Amino acid sequence: MKNRSIILFAAGIMTLFIWSSCTKAEKNVTEQPTNELLTTVQLKAVNTQDPTDTPSAKWVSIPGGSLDTSNAVLYLKNSAVYDLSVIFLDESKTPASDITADIRARGNYHLVCFGISGALSLGIVPTDHDTNSPSLPIGLRNRVTTNLIGTGNLEVTLHHQPNVKNGDCAPGSIDADVNFRVHVD
């Protein structure tokens, strides 16, 4: 009878040990990734029918420095299809860091959204997706179709959405929110 009590006591201690180990592991999983420090947003496009047509645009704001939107203009051809990449950099340090790969690696927590205004008619479809089930767009790579000649603004926002990403731009916080001028000729 005494041996049985010792075995039950040891089993109880072992169960308590296993249960407390699982609880600690779960706490580590719920840590939220922080927002990225982004100073520069670049757009790089490649015309799918003319690979020599490669327009790009760049928006820069260094903390403690100045805002540079002089190159934040994108020139596209009418009735064309472009593969558009969005690139995020941290140029607050030397050398600059390309944050795009980190965003792609944590695609389940990020979504790039686009807002179109003015006399601009673009179709934008994300071509990259995360590993959520079902998979959701990330928006670092996109297919852009120009529909009409015109000029307007393209707002690019990077949404930070840990544990709330659902394919919509509303949840989470914003890592970047910039505007590019777009001319379609």
Image (cartoon, rainbow, N blue to C red):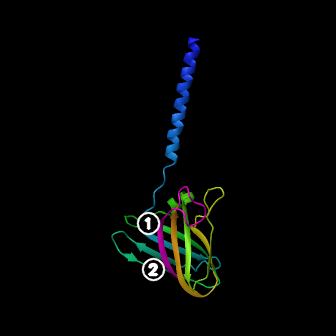
Residue shown at the point (55%, 55%) measured from the top left: 163
Q: Is residue 147 above or below residue 93?
A: below
Looking at the rendered image, the quarter that the C terminus falls into is bottom right
Q: Which residue is mark 2?
A: 71
Q: Is residue 18 above or below residue 57?
A: above
As helix, strand or loop, the secondary structure at mark 1 comes to loop
Q: Is residue 67 above or below residue 159?
A: below
Q: Nearer the viewer's eye, disc 2 or disc 1?
A: 1
Q: Is residue 84 above or below residue 2?
A: below
- Disc number placed over residue 38 in the picture, else none: 1
Residue 154, x across and y down, in percent: 53, 78
Residue shown at the point (54%, 32%) measured from the top left: 18
Which of 128/23 is in front? 23
Residue 130, x across and y down, in percent: 60, 59
**Residue 3 location, quadrant:** top right
Q: Is residue 100 visible?
A: yes
